[in-house]
Amino acid sequence: MIKKIPPQKTETYGMPTEVIFGRGAFKLIENEEIIIRAKKIVIVAGEHFKQTSSFIDLEKKLEGKEIEVIVYDTKIAKSDFDTINSLTDYFRKNAPEIVIVIGGGTILDTAKCAAILAINGGNVEDYLVTKKLQLDNKGIPLVTVPTTSGTGSEVTPWAVIWDFANHEKHSLSSPLMFPYLAVVDPALTDNLPPKITAETGMDALTQAIEAYWSKFHNPVSDKYALEAIKLVMKYLSIAVNDSTPESRNMMSKASLFAGLAFSNTKTTICHSVSYPMTAHWGVAHGQAVSVTLSEFIRYSLPAMQERERKLIKALGADSVEEAAQKVGDLMKEVHLATRLSELEIKKEDIPIIVLEGYDPDRANNAPRVPTQEELKLILEKIL
């Protein structure tokens, strides 16, 4: 029997991060009051972006304001314990007043962790493995600048951390981790490769759908989530297959809105199930979270009852089945896998995903929570 979600007694929404959005917004960073007041700033950025004229111009303009600018010169390829601890030590050694971090979700998450650990002490393992420490203080103020359209990490209070040696995913999370300022400039995504555009775009769609159907949704998160869904459904295929400034603008907005939505609701079952796919088979995050999305739409939406109508409409559909098909069709249009077998995941692998992907902290947020046996059957449907 499908049970209706009981109404919440209270509904709250909070977002301490100031957001600047728009094409050309990156050029405004130098004039922000938090930047003008600073004497020392560390910039963490992707290797490719460091070579761009936008980065070089920013560095020169900050130095022209007599700000000491230090550029972190170590490549950040993954947000794992060693990478985070190294950046944390760097922040402690250089003691910047502000950190500007420019990049995709991995770089943003790494810097978010290091900025708060630099103030609170210890290494990341002390908070996630031994749990002998807890986050009590805000970190170094962060200015986040995303260069992809999907993770929403620029406005969320947590970060994904990987322990690939043990095939484990962790999350460092605290309201103290919200960035101080997010600068979202769609122009920084104009040259994003089609594959990354597709993967990050589907991450944004999944986050928005999960934010809407999360048990912790609220009226504000609903508005952001529904608008993000509409934008992704309309513009992602264009951004992947025939990129235009408008499609990049709208995908940046969709990603930001999805982040603003799930920053208050957390993600749910699709993300929970995705983590073993990444840890064991190296499946890219956006691909991993979205490969189960159509099937979970079929499974979850009937439990939403009166709320399902708005979600179905946002997906451009008239029924649950059509909504699921629309998502599957979009994934095919942007050249992503819709079957587990396309990702080299076999039937005998499913028990690993069920065992490690059934995270109550995420799965229980969903409108309909599958048993482990039901989850196994759902995954078998998309082999």
Image (tube, grey):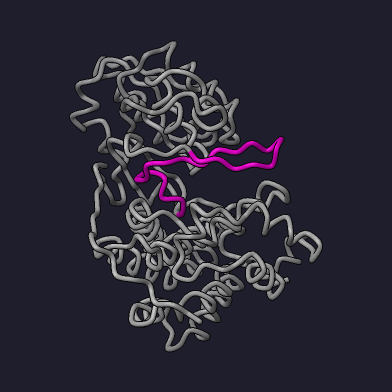
Q: What is the tally of numbered marks visible in this picture?
A: 0
Residue 194 in sight: no
User: Residue 100 location in percent, x, y?
Assistant: 37, 30
Left or right of residue 356: residue 188: left
150 over 117 or under it: above or below: below
User: Residue 75 location in percent, x, y?
Assistant: 58, 28
353 over 333 or under it: above or below: above
Q: Nearer the viewer, residue 121 or 70?
A: 121
- The answer to which image quadrant residue 377 occupies is bottom right
Q: Is residue 160 magenta?
A: yes
- The answer to which image quadrant residue 28 occupies is top left
Q: Residue at x 49, y 55 (%)?
A: 362
Q: Residue at x 24, y 42 (%)?
A: 16
- The answer to which image quadrant residue 147 occupies is top left
- The part of the chain drawn in magenta is 150-171
Q: Is residue 190 magenta?
A: no
* The C terminus, quarter of image: bottom right
Q: Nearer the viewer, residue 128 or 138?
A: 128
Q: Residue at x 69, y 42 (%)?
A: 167
Q: Nearer the viewer, residue 352 or 165?
A: 352
Q: Residue at x 71, y 66 (%)?
A: 340
User: Residue 91 location in percent, x, y?
Assistant: 43, 18
User: Residue 72 location in percent, x, y?
Assistant: 48, 22
Residue 293 in sight: yes
Residue ranking furthest to the top: 93
